[in-house]
């Protein structure tokens, strides 16, 4: 079975070598770079077995991009909510899930599944007012939503919901699941604030949001920022996704 590898980073700009990848299942690091070939250098290496290759990488590559053991910084949902007024410039979201349990508890979801026009006016008035206030301050809210083929009922509901969100100032684009897989986007839901703080959303087996992990380590934040840039480049405005496919039975 092929490994599931994540590109952690490179210190060489556009050349991509040397670089570090991480095995998402085993935690092993895969390093590639310039091979060490000088015979006198090789004789100084201990435990270099036949078939193994020594490579030379700058020390900072391992420091910046090698796997790290850390204690997760987990916060509750109330503290998470405060991030949406504390940030300075940009808040960007990747939505990857096929359903969100909280959506299914709403009257708007019931209207949608009854194939009725969804009445968004007045829904979540406090949330809408806060979004408008933040946008008026010059802040940006952007999302990319991943759509399956065909979209799930929950994804189609969120396409309808995008009308409400865009009305309060959010910019919402979509990307197909196949495109997301081709870009090797993380299979995670997260917000990234001001390109320096990642809020990783943790869900239980019933698709309920339970808590949020904050990530501030620069190399890790950089990985999410690269995913954001790739997703935003290829995603299209949600209006282009439309409602061409019926919800699955």
Image: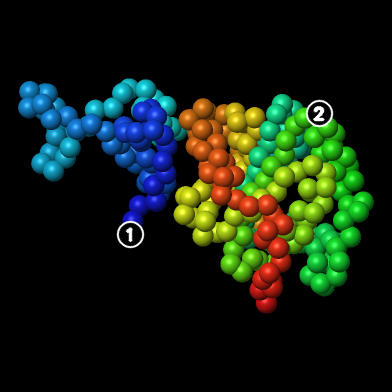
Q: Position of residue 64 (x, y in %)?
A: 42, 27
Which residue is at 7% across, 27% downward?
39
Q: Nearer the viewer, residue 91 or 126?
A: 91
Would you call the spot at circle 1 few (<14 residues within 10 Å), some (14-19), or many (20 or more)? few
Reply above or below: 47 against 228: above
Quadrant for the C terminus in the image: bottom right
Q: Which residue is mark 2?
A: 137
Total numbered circles: 2
**Residue 224 visible within the image:** no
Q: Is residue 13 left or right of residue 151?
A: left
Examine the image and state in which quarter residue 29 appears. Answer: top left
Q: Position of residue 132 (x, y in %)?
A: 84, 38
Q: Earlier in the sequence, mark 1 or mark 2?
A: 1
Q: Which mark is residue 81?
A: none
Spatial CA distance of label 1 from label 2 is 50 Å
Q: Secondary structure at mark 1?
A: loop
Reply above or below: 162 against 10: below
Q: Secondary structure at mark 2?
A: loop
Q: Which residue is mark 1?
A: 1
Quadrant for the N terminus in the image: bottom left
Examine the image and state in which quarter residue 150 appears. Answer: bottom right
Q: Nearer the viewer, residue 50 or 95?
A: 95
Q: Is residue 121 left or right of residue 193?
A: right
Q: Is residue 119 left or right of residue 196?
A: right
Which residue is at 27% across, 33% downward?
33
**Residue 128 visible within the image:** yes
């Amino acid at each position: 079975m092929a490994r599931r590898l994540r590109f952690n980073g490179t210190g060489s700009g556009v050349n991509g070598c040397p670089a570090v990848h991480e095995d998402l299942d085993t935690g092993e690091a895969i390093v590639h770079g310039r091979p060490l070939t000088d015979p006198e250098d090789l004789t100084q290496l201990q435990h270099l077995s036949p078939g193994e290759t020594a490579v030379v990488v700058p020390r900072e590559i391992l420091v910046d991009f090698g796997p790290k053991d850390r204690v997760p910084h987990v916060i509750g949902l109330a503290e998470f909510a405060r991030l949406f007024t504390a940030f300075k410039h940009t808040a960007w979201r990747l939505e990857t899930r096929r359903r969100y349990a909280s959506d299914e508890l709403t009257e708007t979801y019931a209207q949608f599944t009854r194939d009725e026009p969804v009445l968004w006016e007045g829904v979540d008035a406090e949330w809408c007012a806060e979004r408008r206030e933040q946008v008026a301050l010059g802040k940006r809210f952007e999302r990319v939503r991943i759509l399956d083929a065909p979209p799930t009922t929950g994804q189609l509901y969120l396409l309808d919901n995008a009308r409400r969100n865009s009305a309060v100032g959010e910019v919402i684009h979509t990307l197909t699941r196949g495109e997301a897989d081709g870009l090797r986007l993380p299979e995670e839901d997260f917000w990234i604030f001001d390109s320096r703080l990642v809020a990783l959303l943790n869900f239980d087996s019933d698709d309920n949001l339970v808590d949020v992990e904050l990530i501030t380590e620069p190399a890790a934040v950089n990985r999410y920022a690269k995913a954001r840039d790739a997703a935003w480049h290829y995603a299209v405005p949600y209006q282009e996704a439309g409602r061409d496919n019926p919800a699955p039975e």
